[in-house]
Amino acid sequence: MNTNSLPNMPWQERPSGVSDVVWRYAANPIIPRNLIPSSNSIFNSAVVPFNGKFAGVFRCDNKKRDMNIHRGFSDDGLQWNLENDPIEWKYNDPELGHFQYRYDPRVVWLEDRYYVTWCNGYHGPTIGIGYTFDFEKFTFLENALLPFNRNGVLFPEKSTTNMSCSAGPAITAIRLWRYLPESKPDMVHWGEHRFVMGTKGGWQSTKVGAGPVPIETPQAGSCSIMAYLPPAMGLYIVSARRCSTWTSPGR
């Protein structure tokens, strides 16, 4: 990966007899569903290195099943402390304070700050974009796209003039297509949508959607996607040398 080495990155060696590319940590779950007093469940974590330790944002559903985003910190990536109260977003337009839910957060370092994207409920699911410098104060920039969109991730690099985001407009209630809109440097005005991936039948016959933030390797960009074939959903790996051309996903 094209990134700095992290000497304290938690790691467990491949278990004996396992040949899979990815394997489960033996002490799962790292974060139990009731880690904080208000939570009924906790998931969709987005974690990044921060000041030699780790920070992240997490979807926490409270006991009324309200979905919101909370911040959390860890020294080693394994023992976590999450805030019981949701993140308080600062914004210039009061209209941005009207939301139905917040879930599926992603975090990426870009230039001089950490950008957060999430599924924001604003008359239907859309992609909220905000940022933080220190995981103490969070600024809400804008809803990037009209409903219905979700699973938005920012690519961890900036092109000559634009930034890229992968988001999934819902053509029907259950069929998601993947588009690649670009933004001017303000991260507010988005356009030039380009089709990059769609459902093909088989295991990806119903939905495809971005998983975590893509990573860059010396050979290509790589991203995991969520794909849905009733009654199950799975994660799959895709890669690309350019953001607009992705290979057929592999399990």
Image (cartoon, helix red, strand yellow):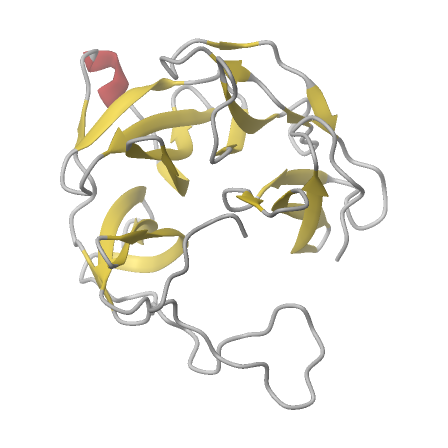
Q: Position of residue 175 (x, y in %)?
A: 70, 32
Residue 98 in view in this figure:
no
Q: Position of residue 59 (x, y in %)?
A: 35, 48
| Vertical arrangement, residue 37 with respect to residue 164, above or below | below
| Vertical arrangement, residue 90 with respect to residue 55, above or below | above
Residue under the image location 64 percent in, 90 percent down: 16
Residue under the image location 60 percent in, 48 percent down: 217
Residue under the image location 42 percent in, 19 percent down: 123
| Vertical arrangement, residue 246 with respect to residue 185, above or below | below
Residue under the image location 68 percent in, 83 percent down: 18
Q: Is residue 12 left or right of residue 56?
A: right
Which quadrant of the view contains residue 17? bottom right
Front residue of 47 and 70: 47
Q: Position of residue 37 (x, y in %)?
A: 18, 62
Front residue of 36 and 45: 45
| Vertical arrangement, residue 38 with respect to residue 210, above or below | below
Spot the residue most to the bottom: 16
Q: Is residue 101 left or right of residue 184?
A: left
Q: Position of residue 156 (x, y in %)?
A: 47, 36
Q: How many marks?
A: 0
Q: Quadrant of the C terminus?
A: bottom right
Front residue of 15 and 217: 217
